[in-house]
Image (cartoon, rainbow, N blue to C red):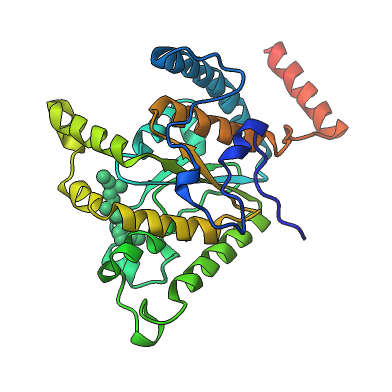
Amino acid sequence: MRVKGPTVRKYLKKYIAAPEHRIRLKDFNSDDVLHDSMIVKNGEDIKDTLENLLAKDRTALARAQELLAASRKHSILIVLQGMDTAGKDGTIQHVMSGLNPQGCEVHSFKVPTSEDHAHDFLWRYEKVLPERGMIGIFNRSYYEDVLVVHVHPDRIEDLPESIGPNTKGFWEGRYRDINAFEKHLVRNGTVILKIFLHISRDEQKRRLLARLENEEKYWKFSYSDIAERQYWGEYIAAYEEMLSATSTEYAPWFIVPADHKWMARTVVAELITSAIEGLRLSYPKFSPDQIQHFTAAKETLEKE
Ligand code: AMP
Ligand code: MG
């Protein structure tokens, strides 16, 4: 059986990290702005145009989600990755505002607990996968287990020497495990949308400074973000290796330009909407017998 990837609008295809290719992030503009039909004159126009599109997307997304819930055949798993300050939280907040909260679950993954580390690396993610009819959003994911710990091998769980990160092919093994895991999910009706929010190093600096210049943003600041910034090059290398190894036909990565927040949010909303619409779902069908029962029920109610 061929396992198909998500269907997305034509103009979004340029953000796909081509499967079986060596991915270089510098080939993808982090400050790209949409899209052929948009007439953009200056920064403010971009924001207005995208806000309008986002408002339209919210309506489309709400309808798509209702169909997903009504038909209960598929689930949607959205995997969000990105450097610190890439806009994962803000994107989730905006996309969620168009969704019915009862049909959507967000899971944010932090430093693993000792219980997490006592299991295989996929365990904590597997436990909270979305059921049929639901949208699950992973704010960070099992990809951290080939990213942050690839850059900092001392943060990986305690593994026997013979199978640990110093063994040959360790990371390739993890990529293969992830690919197999995702293929299994897709084959069972999950649509996986993997989104990398792509920001430039300069934009990260601006955003970190903004957090330090505004008291109301202090709470978002973390010293570890400054420390991790020193490893920018190592993170890019880890991301490129991971994207090259795990962008597949059935679960491709989308490298979404995220230097402009509104741009990223709109593209993400459009990706989700088109992926659900692409499933060509329909409301459940009822037999003539069942419809007769509904008619009888309606008459009973009307007679009250
Ligand atoms: P934040 O997303 O800013 O709340 O930070 C979450 C932190 O958890 C980041 O510093 C991540 O690097 C860290 N983290 C998330 N997943 C893992 C993981 N699997 N292994 C190690 N650190 C992780
Ligand atoms: Mg953070």
Q: Quadrant of residue 147?
A: bottom left
Residue 144 percent coordinates (x, y): 38, 58
Which quarter of the rendered picture does the C terminus lie within?
Answer: top right
Which residue shows up at 24% across the image and 49% down it? 229
Q: Quadrant of residue 185?
A: bottom right
Residue sitting nearer the eye, 17 or 220: 17
Which residue shows up at 51% across the image and 17% down it? 55
| Residue 219 horizontal side relative to residue 13, left or right | left
Determine if residue 127 is in view. Answer: no
Indicate the quadrant of ligand 2 in the picture: top left
Q: Is residue 253 above or below residue 121?
A: above
Which residue shows up at 16% across the image and 26% down it? 216
Q: Is residue 304 above or below residue 54?
A: above
Residue 184 percent coordinates (x, y): 62, 62
Residue 92 percent coordinates (x, y): 41, 35
Instruction: Residue at the far front: name it.
Output: 26
| Residue 256 horizontal side relative to residue 272, left or right | left
| Residue 65 horizontal side relative to residue 223, left or right | right
Instruction: Residue at the far right: name it.
Output: 288
Which quarter of the rendered picture does the N terminus lie within?
Answer: bottom right
